[in-house]
Image (cartoon, grey):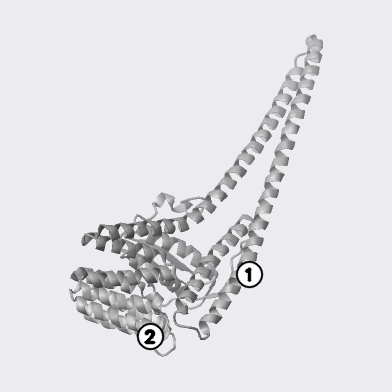
Amino acid sequence: HRKAAELREGSDYFHGIAYSHQYMAMIHRKEERFDEAIAEYRIAAHFFQQVPTYSQVASTYGSIARIHMDLGDADAALATLGQALELLERFNEAVFAGNLYDLAGDIHDFRGDLVKAREAYEHAAHIAVESGSLDLQVVTARHLSRLFEKHGDARNAYLQQQRFLAARDSLRNRSGRSEVLRMMLEHDAEQAKVEKEKHDEARRMEQQEELQSRQRQQRFYMAGGGVLLVFAIGLVGRIRHSQRSRRELERQRNDLQRAKQRAEQSEKFKERFLANMSHEIRTPMNAIMGMTTIMRRNAHLPHQEVYLNAIALSSENLLHIINDILDLSKLDADRLELERTAMDPMEVVRSILDDLGPRARSKGLELRSRIVEGLPRSVLGDPTRLRQLLMNLAENAVKYTREGHVDISVTTGPITGNGMSLVFAISDTGPGIPPERMGSIFEEFNK
């Protein structure tokens, strides 16, 4: 990481320089070289500010404050948080200060200062509501409830517990919407499976009937002339029965064919509806996001920054859901094609670390990347699908890992006829995926 930072310092790639110093700080902290860790974190915060990425600035200062708390120096931890909060206020980025105020509340509570702890927690709760962060609303409500309970304020403890439960339910409901969509698609697939089984069973019965008919006719021919009359009578009856059976089978086959056509037509209508509605919704959403970007770039009042950031974040989340629906419709229609464009695999990994980093840190997990040296900076592939794949695996790893770390590693694979290949791996200290299930995790409706 030090070598990477030295190579990048000659360029304007402040984001990469900041991450290199942040990784060095994490290594120093793990090896209990706390002074070196604090120094590297401060360098990382400086370069994150140059990008600027104020969410990472806040996260870095929070890491410094936690080191001071590990050393038992609460005053230094509070001073560090004060520097970070002053910096965010100066640049009108107070929306990222929620976790810092929550950490300050923990420190004041540790020192036994109820008033300051309450002020810090309530400030964090206010930012959580303004920014629409359900994760932070859950954390702050839980901390306030425990604080009031510890100091004998049962009424406020109860009120905060109710807010905690409401925020937690809202967070679960947001996750449940994707589960509803999955259940709808699973139901459609089950219906198609039933229709196919009926069609196969009718075909099998028809073939079996035809085979039995031929066998019976052969036996009749071999009976001999002595039973010719009986054979003729039986043959006439058999022919009539066969005709009735064929008419019944033909009727069943026609019914199944019509049912199949209705199912296919219904599927086409659904695909067309999903595709059209996705495009119709995505067009105004892009307009909203574009106008929000213009408003954020132009002059506006400082207090309006919180609302503009909330609009931008909510728009991005909604556009992500819309794109997922469009991808599902393409998958159903077998029209999803992989792109083959130039991409930076390390940048894909970094974007995942940026998105999942706050969630991992809120659970006390360490989200890190392990990228082998000498990887090419530009390869051919589909960055969007690669990011979706890695994000799903990494998000599940963070979700189900209770303590420890989650690693995203990139190594070189075997040389193929098209050149070098890359191997991406997600590993964690949680329950993981059983080896016997590895072959089915990419199949439909597998959890």
Q: Residue at x 58, y 77 (%)?
A: 290
The x and y percentages for residue 269 are 68, 53
User: Which quadrant of the structure image shows residue 94?
Assistant: bottom left
User: Which quadrant of the structure image shows residue 30?
Assistant: bottom left
Q: Residues within 10 Å of mark 1 (few under 14, many from 20)?
A: few
Task: Say what secondary structure mark 1 lies in.
Answer: helix
Task: Tell me whether the residue at label 1 lies in contact with that at label 2, contact meaning CB atoms closer than 8 angstroms.
Answer: no
Which residue ends up furthest to the front in the rendered image?
A: 155
Find disc 2 in the rendering and name its residue.
90
Which residue ends up furthest to the top in the rendered image?
A: 226
Viewer-proximal residue, 100 or 148?
A: 148
The x and y percentages for residue 349 are 44, 71
Q: Residues within 10 Å of mark 2 (few under 14, many from 20)?
A: few
- Relative placement, left or right, of 129 versus 153 is right
Cα distance between the residues tagged 1 and 2: 35 Å
Q: Quadrant of the N terminus?
A: bottom left
User: Which label number is shown at residue 283?
Assistant: 1
Q: Earlier in the sequence, mark 1 or mark 2?
A: 2
